């Protein structure tokens, strides 16, 4: 069914006026919500920045600890090879290897726990930002 031209223009005028009126009403609300959204984004950005800086710092410390473990392992192996008795030397090498593996496991475990804790703190901070945002919008 084809509508006559005068009905189409009337419907278009109603549509345009509805859009204009709706925009006039919703525009101030959108600006207000955008300002709150800006504060929310800045809050989350600050929380993310704290998390990332702490993660970088802990990653550097973790790799420094691993490097120290490698140097310690190397020095213990050098000392073990100075032992002339085969049985004592092999025991010293095994002991150095075991301590090295245990040290690496310990540092890896601590590093993962620290990163997990940082993520929990970030989620808590982000939730607080979201709650503050919701409380302001009400």
Image (cartoon, rainbow, N blue to C red):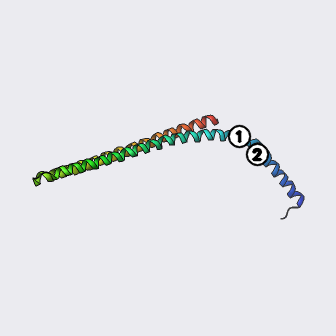
**Residue 105 appears anywhere in the view:** no
Mark drawn on residue 136: none
Secondary structure, mark 1, is helix
First in sequence: mark 1 vs mark 2: 2
For the residues marked 1 and 2, what is the alpha-carbon distance in whole angstroms? Answer: 10 Å
For residue 9, above or below residue 131: below
Give the label on residue 23, or none.
Answer: 2
Q: Residue 33 vs residue 16: left or right? A: left
Residue at 85% x, 64% y: name it: 2
Q: Are marks 1 and 2 in contact (CB under 8 Å)?
A: no
- Identity of the residue drawn at 63% across and 38% down: 36
Q: Is residue 74 above or below residue 118?
A: below
Screen quadrant of the C terminus: top right
Q: Quadrant of the N terminus?
A: bottom right
Residue at (70% x, 42% y) in the render: 30
The image shows residue 63 at horizontal and vertical percentages of: 36, 48
- Residue at the farthest left position: 85
Q: Which residue is mark 1?
A: 29
x and y, in percent, of residue 114 in the image? 39, 42
Say whether residue 96 is left or right of residue 10.
left
* Element on which disc 2 rests: helix
Residue 121 x/y as whole percent: 46, 39
Judged from this view, the residue extending furthest toward the bottom is 1
- Horizontal and vertical percent position of residue 67: 32, 48
- The structure residue drawn at horizontal position 24% and vertical position 51%, both measured from the top left corner, is 74
The residue most toward the right is: 6
Residue 65 visible in the shown view: yes
Front-most of residues 25 and 39: 39
Q: Is residue 12 left or right of residue 78?
A: right
- Pointer 1 local density, CA inside 10 Å: few below 14, some 14–19, many at least 20: few
Residue 113: quarter of image: top left
């Amino acid at each position: 069914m084809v509508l006559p031209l005068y009905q189409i223009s009337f419907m278009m005028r109603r549509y345009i006026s509805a859009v204009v009126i709706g925009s006039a009403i919703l525009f101030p609300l959108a600006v207000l919500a955008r300002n709150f959204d800006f504060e929310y984004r800045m809050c989350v950005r600050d929380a993310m920045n704290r998390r990332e800086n702490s993660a970088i710092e802990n990653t550097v410390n973790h790799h420094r600890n691993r490097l120290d473990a490698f140097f310690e392992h190397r020095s213990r192996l050098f000392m073990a090879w100075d032992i002339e008795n085969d049985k004592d030397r092999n025991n010293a090498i095994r002991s150095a290897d075991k301590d090295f593996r245990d040290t690496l496991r310990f540092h890896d475990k601590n590093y993962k726990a620290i990163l997990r804790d940082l993520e929990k703190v970030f989620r808590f901070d982000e939730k607080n930002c979201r709650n503050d945002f919701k409380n302001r919008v009400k």
